[in-house]
Image (cartoon, rainbow, N blue to C red):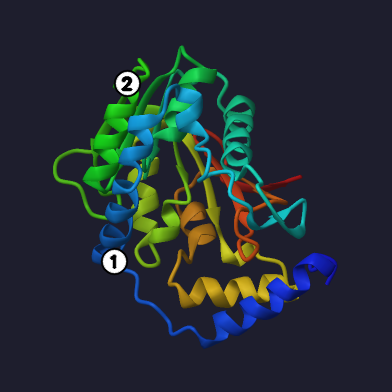
Amino acid sequence: MGEVQTAGVGYFVRTAARVLRRPRLRRDLGAVLDEYSAGWESYRRHLEVAASVDDWLFLRGVDDVPRYCRRDGVIEHSGFNSARFYREALLAAMVRHFPAATSVAEFGSGLGRNLLHLKRVLPELSLSGFELCEAGVEIGQRSAAKFGLDVAFTQFDFSQESKGPIEPVCDVAFTMFALEQVPRGISGALSRIYQRARLGTIHIEPVTENYPWTPLGLLGRIDHWKVDYLSGFPMAALQLGAHVHHQQLASSHNPLMFPSVYVLERGQVPHVVGET
């Protein structure tokens, strides 16, 4: 139980009681729209007062508020910059597996901050964001215009069958805590994203099949099931016939989540590779 050090024991006990009491949710399109439309709307005022793209990418009083997290495998209460941590993991996967990529798309782009960060770091990339909620699309468009960054945002629901032919829209597609909102139909959702990428895809998602069999990992599995998050991702990835690379992250914004980085590469013999 090394992950639950002295500072995390109280958190673990309180959270276990809360998780076990919580009734199971039923996550569907309506629930996701209600939750995230309101959530993204609350960021409009932050965008209005942000003086620079740096201010927008790391909001003081929002992103730096101390909270319980898991850092290097240990629970702590801190202002851990999880957004930067995940963006660095994404960038590392892109550079390692897709160095020739010239166009990248995020599916489930939210407010678009991941893409604005990528544009700052790799300005030569052509970037697009596809988001379910209109509020997220609009705020993404406004932020790109405000800070003079060439990033396109479009409304799109990857959980549903598309009308018309499917064509690649980018070299690399990625998701970051977006597929977690698809508890059923993951094979179709993942396939719709994969088919739109010429080289392959990257996914930073909480995949419970990879959670450790520790007290915290077990509680995380229960919590994940209670809130009706993603399931079946490893099998869905294998069914695509891709070369699958998998890495477990040691840190998380939520102590009950153990995010994985999955890279699905085209043009190679299907195989699963675990990375450290």
| Residue at mark 1 | 31
Q: Which badge, 1 or 2, is on the more N-terminal residue? A: 1
Q: How many marks?
A: 2
Give the label on residue 81, or none.
none
Q: Quadrant of residue 137?
A: top left
Write the residue at 43% across / 82% down: 24
Q: Residue furthest bottom?
A: 21
Q: Residue furthest left?
A: 164
The answer to whether 109 appears left or right of 245 in the picture is: left
**Where does residue 203 sit, x and y in percent of width and height?**
51, 45
Looking at the rendered structure, the kind of residue marked 2 is: Lys
Quadrant where the image shows the N terminus: bottom right
Q: Quadrant of residue 141?
A: top left
Q: Nearer the viewer, residue 72 or 49?
A: 49
**Where does residue 199 sit, x and y in percent of width and height?**
46, 30
The answer to whether 58 appears left or right of 5 in the picture is: left
Q: Residues within 10 Å of mark 2 (few under 14, many from 20)?
A: some
From the viewer's perspective, is residue 26 above or below residue 92? below
Pointer 1 with pointer 2, Cβ within 8 A = no
Question: Is label 1 in a helix, a strand or a loop?
Answer: helix
| Residue at mark 2 | 146
From the viewer's perspective, is residue 124 above or below residue 252? above
**Where does residue 126 sit, x and y in percent of width and height?**
38, 19
